Image (spheres, rainbow, N blue to C red):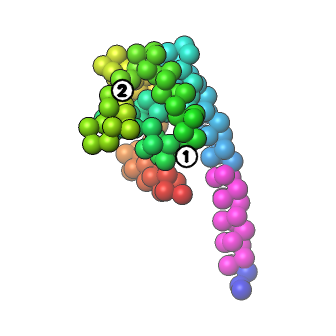
Amino acid sequence: MSTVDDADRVDLDEVVTEFQGHMSLMFTRARSLWRESAAMVHPDLQPSGYKLLTHIARVGSSNAHQLSECFEMDKSAISRQVRMLEDAGLIESRPDESDGRLRVLTATAAARDLLATVRNHHSNRIRTAISGLTPDEMRVASMVFSRLAEI
């Protein structure tokens, strides 16, 4: 292996290490953001419940089994969060017409309104954070996030 290859490898190792550090910080901030977002929706809502609620609202409807698979969460944890979301008036539950054992979960209008408020709040923060980037840099950042989501 030539010295240029060794230097490139060392540079890549340094970049990967730096990248991992930034990702770790981003995940820490994301967890804080989920806590903040959950509290904006309902004072008793846990971050995991917030993630379930946003997913249900985004896809239109879901059931506990699908949520358990999607989020790789224990069914009992899903059940507790679903119960809290129902008690708070954030989701509605009805029997699945094709399988009576399942309950179809949908976000209430109130939940969708609250989620829109939270989304607008965070969109403004993101716009401020990326305001110095060019459109091409924004597209590259979006592509990087998309690739990372596939890991």
Q: Is residue 71 above or below residue 44?
A: below
In the rendered image, the residue lying farthest to the front is 100
Disc 2, SS: strand
> Please, what is the three-letter code of the amino acid marked with disc 1?
Glu
Rounded to the nearest whole Å, what is the CA distance between mark 2 and mark 1? 21 Å
Span highlighted in magenta in the image: 4-20
Secondary structure of the magenta portion, mostly?
helix
Work out which residue is located at the far left of the displayed protein and give it: 97
On the image, numbered disc 1 is attached to which residue? 72
Q: Position of residue 115 (x, y in %)?
A: 39, 23
Label 1, residues with CA under 10 Å away: few <14, some 14-19, many ≥20? few
Quadrant the C terminus occupies:
bottom right
State how many labels appear: 2
Question: Which quadrant of the structure image shows residue 77?
Answer: top right
Q: Which residue is drawn at the image coordinates 52% and 31% (left, top)?
A: 79
The one nearer the camera, 5 or 20, is 20
Is residue 24 placed above or below 33 in the rendered structure? below
**Quadrant that contains the N terminus:** bottom right
- Residue at left 58%, top 41%? 74
Q: Earlier in the sequence, mark 2 or mark 1?
A: 1
Residue drawn 41% across the image and 26% down it = 119
Q: What is the x, y in percent for residue 110?
A: 34, 16
| Residue drawn at 50 percent across, 21 percent down | 84
**Above or below — where is 6 with respect to 60?**
below
Question: Which quadrant of the figure has residue 76?
Answer: top right
Task: Return the residue at label 2.
Answer: 93
Image quadrant assignment for residue 123: top left
> Which tag is nearer the camera, tag 2 or tag 1?
2
